Image (spheres, rainbow, N blue to C red):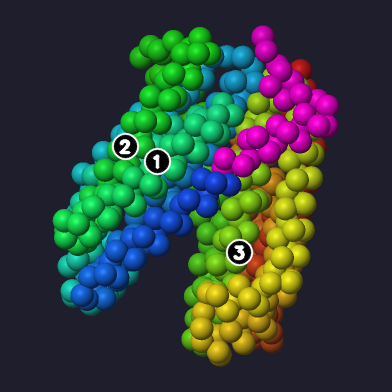
């Protein structure tokens, strides 16, 4: 039976090479994603009415909110597949991937069936003018047909990450984004289909990426000697319960992750338009920072999950240590870059003098952010890879309570600085709480 050390060499130079071999494709995939939103906005901006831009913005926000809830299909599949791969269980890898793809497709079909009520709910949550709502309804009712493909794509990406095939994951992600851009230009600029063209382009791109990703995954599994799982294997009660147990914890964990960011925006809006705009500018820098830290977290997922599945405690510790070391270096680099060039970046994002001045006043919090967030990002990856999702859920809940307490104690006295302090406390709490639970992971990884 192969062990984790077969795919994760112990010498430091090999570890460094392994970490970056797995990380750079994810960085590129992450950086390709914002291109889609930019092109969607650009092609709508060529049309004669600003309502077109508003409609796509509202429709995309609705779908982002819906699909965010199904992120567990990627995260849960990565951890389970990585552990099966570490244990040398080729048949179980195929069964896990098949279960996740089937569940994703089934949930997507359910979304299609509920398309009209979901569209109505989304437009109620994001109210706009009658013209924007009519156009957004067109976008929603057409794009929903891509849901089975996209949710299956989440599962395929999770399996590819778990198998440490980041290059294949990069190929599929870039294909999705490039196809979306090309179809936008064809359907909107050339054929003049407007909002319907953007929606159809996205849906077709999702089906294309899902199909290509599934073909790549099947080839990779065949090369590992996996065979098509039987219906009895797919429906094994304990395996299904494990998948849904991991998924349920990840859904709750993701809700707790998003809650402080939602509250941050809502409370910032109450402090005035200038403060709201300044926070929005600085959050763009936060999301840029997350590209690198998230990519290293994905690497931590697959390496630690592989070692955990092999019951190789030494390799688990090395995988966690080397990915943490590189995460800290990236965080230091980003923090230094923001300290030196943060003002320039703010000026590139906004031209409004009052917003620029306000954002600069809070920039020190953004310089600090990579340093206080790095542990949270990294340990999230470690606990997702080892599928210790109950610990993730519980730690995130306590961290949210720390955020709420900090806001309650400081908002009236410190204003927006209190909000940034609360976000900092949230990140530190996540790190401390998960770090306190890490030693148990190593005990569980004993042979």
* Residue that label 3 marks: 286
Give the mark nearer the N terminus: 1 vs 2.
1
Whether 25 is among the magenta residues is: yes
Is residue 92 in view?
Answer: yes
Give the magenta range.
1-26
User: What type of secondary structure mainly makes up the magenta span?
Assistant: helix
Residue named by callout 2: 208
Q: Position of residue 169 (x, y in %)?
A: 49, 35
**Proximity of marks 1 and 2: CB atoms separated by less than 8 Å:** yes
| Front one among 444 and 94 | 94
Q: Is residue 94 above or below residue 189?
A: above
Q: At 83% across and 27% down in the image, what residue appears?
A: 11
Across and down, in percent, residue 181 comes to: 34, 52
The image quadrant where one finds the N terminus is top right
Q: Distance between the residues labelled 3 and 1?
A: 26 Å
Across and down, in percent, residue 345 comes to 61, 73
């Amino acid at each position: 039976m192969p062990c984790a050390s077969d795919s994760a060499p112990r010498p430091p130079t090999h570890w460094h090479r392994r970490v970056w071999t797995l990380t750079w494709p994810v960085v590129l995939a992450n950086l390709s994603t914002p291109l889609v939103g930019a092109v969607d906005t650009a092609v709508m901006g060529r049309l004669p009415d600003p309502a077109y831009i508003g409609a796509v913005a509202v429709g995309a926000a609705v779908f982002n909110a819906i699909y965010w809830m199904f992120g567990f299909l990627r995260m849960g599949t990565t951890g389970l597949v990585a552990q099966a791969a570490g244990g040398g269980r080729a048949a179980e890898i195929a069964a896990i991937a098949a279960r996740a793809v089937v569940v994703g497709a089934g949930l997507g079909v359910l979304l299609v069936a509920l398309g009209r009520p979901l569209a109505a709910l989304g437009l109620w949550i994001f109210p706009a003018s009658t013209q924007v709502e009519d156009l957004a309804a067109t976008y929603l009712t057409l794009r929903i047909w891509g849901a089975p493909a996209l949710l299956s794509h989440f599962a395929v990406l999770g399996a590819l990450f778990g198998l440490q095939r980041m290059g294949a994951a990069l190929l599929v992600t870039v294909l999705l984004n490039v196809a979306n851009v090309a179809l936008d230009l064809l359907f909107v600029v050339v054929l003049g289909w407007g909002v319907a063209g953007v929606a159809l382009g996205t849906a077709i791109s999702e089906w294309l990426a899902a199909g290509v990703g599934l073909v790549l995954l099947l080839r990779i599994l065949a090369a590992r000697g996996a065979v098509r799982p039987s219906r009895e294997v797919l429906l094994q009660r304990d395996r299904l319960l494990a998948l849904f147990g991991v998924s349920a914890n990840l859904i709750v964990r993701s809700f707790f992750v998003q809650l402080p960011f939602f509250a941050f925006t809502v409370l910032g809006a109450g402090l005035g338009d200038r403060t709201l705009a300044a926070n929005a500018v600085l959050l763009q820098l936060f999301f840029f920072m997350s590209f690198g830290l998230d990519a290293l977290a994905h690497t931590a997922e697959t390496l630690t999950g592989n070692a955990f599945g092999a019951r190789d405690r030494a390799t688990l510790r090395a995988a966690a240590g080397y990915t943490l070391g590189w995460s800290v270096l990236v965080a230091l680099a980003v923090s230094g870059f923001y300290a030196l060039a943060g003002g320039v970046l703010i000026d590139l994002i906004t031209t409004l003098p009052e917003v620029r001045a306000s954002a600069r006043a809070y920039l020190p919090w953004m310089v600090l952010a990579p340093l206080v967030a790095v542990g949270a990002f990294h340990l999230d990856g470690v606990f997702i890879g080892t599928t210790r999702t109950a610990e993730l859920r519980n730690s995130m809940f306590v961290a949210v309570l720390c955020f709420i307490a900090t806001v309650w104690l400081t908002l009236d006295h410190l204003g927006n600085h209190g909000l940034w302090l609360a976000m900092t406390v949230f990140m530190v709490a996540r790190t401390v709480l998960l770090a306190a639970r890490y030693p148990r992971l190593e005990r569980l990884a004993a042979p």
